[in-house]
Amino acid sequence: MNPDELSPPERRLWEAYRRGASVDLSGGTGRTDTGGSALWGPERMIRADVLAALLAGAVEPQPGQVAGVRLTGARITGTLNLKHARVDVPLDLTGCVLDEAPHLYWATMNSVHLLGCTLPGLVASGARIDGHLWLEDSRIGGGVWLDGAHISGILNMSGVRVANPGGDALLGDRLVVDANVYCDKGFTAEGEVRLPGARIGGQLILRGATLNNAGGPALYASRLEVGANVFCDAGFTARGEVRMRGVRVGGYLSFVGANLAAPGRTALNADDLAVETDVYCSDGFTAEGAVTFAGARVQGQLDLRGARLAHEGGTALSLQRIQAEEVVLRPAEPVRGVVDLAYARINLLRDDPASWPDRLQLDGFQYETLEPPLSARERLNWLRRDTDGYQPQPYERLAQTYRTLGLDEEGRSVLLAKARDRRATQSLPRKAVGWVQDVLVGYGYRPFRALTWLLGLLAIGTVVFSLHHPGVLDDGHKPHFNAFFYTLDLLLPIGSLGQEAEFAPSGFYQWIANLITAGGLLLGLTVAAGVTRALSRE
């Protein structure tokens, strides 16, 4: 480029470049507001070709100085085309307006700062930036393309407003950032924010961000890897699905106070998530649409305290197959929709009867401790909310938990409820047998009930046969009659006390004797069945 063809502001920049000095074209006021850029005259215009020539090394640095493009308050015309270029000096634009999107496609750059700028997009696919990419407070239309890029420092998009409705607001597929990524302090995206397969060495910070893509994913970050923490909290809002399937987080994941909305769809998909410490969806976390952590692995706590979840007519919260040390399932109000805990493995579940959902799925759910330690009657109300109806495993698991705590009576109550609920699913003959077992001995879980029946029959027989002695079978033999032992002899299904063989009632009293004998036999068989069932459980 011929320096003689440069305009006065371009010549200032040309000279300043050699020593890395800043050039301020804002008129000395320090104002960098780009809202009135349409009125900016030639005194604030710089051709993009001039920037490209300087960045490509058209001018030698002044000895002993660090060259660089540092420009404030300029309007840059044309396309800043640095495709496949190697740039060894920093690019620092503050409060500038770019008429066309810069092209850094597969460029190798030093630090790039576009602070408070307005531009119709940024194409940096495959770029290698040896330093920071700083876009703080900029207004970007048409989207930011960083797919396949590698940033050795920080990606700072704090306060950025990027708009590409119906398209990609941020295209970060396979993006690698060695340090932190900041999309906070009012960051707003109209369109999809994509980070699938990206790797972030530090933290991902989306605090207070607003993502709008109601027709599809607001945040698509499947298989994202983050070395430290992920913050989607402090007013984080997403209109559209948040997809974090298969994400790996080296620290903790926070959705505290976040607001997610994807009505009729999945608001948060964190299936197969892996988090080294905790996940917080608490303290005002709100989701309209399904929230799923199916197959997730949380080394610490999954906290849903104070959350509000709603997905009418479907599964509002899926913890299916989750593995977690602790789950706090105490939302601010009952979950509107199904809570699926099928085949989850949780060491400690903290819940609250006041916020139990109306519908649960519990088959295969494994846990060690439930808090608070409610009575069996209260926990059975929890079990019976299962949408699949009677399933044996949830009863067995709850009974085992009570036995582990030394509450054997509570455990027996749960197993008795299991047998009763199972009876409702059986055929009529089996229901009849089961009803008899329940009435007589509580399916073997209430053995003292059989003793009560036996004592009752013994008392009735003793009174009846004391008032009316049965006849002697052998007239030549005069045995002594004892009503108590005679009744006891009738009750015993095996063995003999020598009374039943000597005496025989007649008429109505023979029917009473036969009923006592049948009752003793039935009680004996029922007790034997109950003992056998108890032994098989042990």
Image (tube, helix red, strand yellow):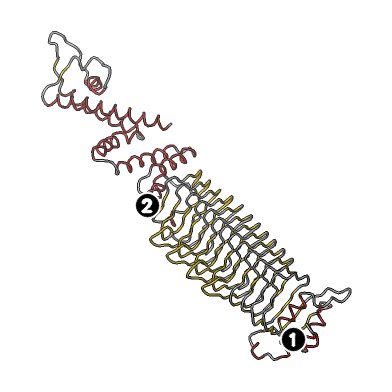
| SS category of the residue bearing label 1 | loop
Q: Position of residue 356 (x, y in %)?
A: 43, 55
Q: Position of residue 114 (x, y in %)?
A: 69, 76
Q: Which residue is under mark 1?
A: 25
Q: Choose between 258 and 470: the one closer to the eye.
A: 258
> In this view, which residue lies farthest toward the right?
63
Q: Which residue is under mark 2?
A: 387
The answer to which quarter of the image holds residue 99 is bottom right
Tell which circle, 2 or 1, labels the residue nearer the N-terminal end: 1
The answer to which quarter of the image holds residue 408 is top left
Residue 175 as seen in the image, left or right of residue 347 = right
- Using the image, determine if residue 134 lies above or below residue 483: below
Q: Position of residue 480 (x, y in %)?
A: 20, 13
Q: Residues within 10 Å of mark 2 (few under 14, many from 20)?
A: some
Q: Position of residue 125 (x, y in %)?
A: 64, 68
Q: Nearer the viewer, mark 2 or mark 1?
A: 1
Amino acid under label 1?
Leu
Amino acid under label 2?
Thr
| SS category of the residue bearing label 2 | loop
- The span from disc 2 to disc 1 (Cα, nearest Å) is 69 Å
Q: Quarter holding the C terminus?
A: top left
Mark carried by residue 158: none
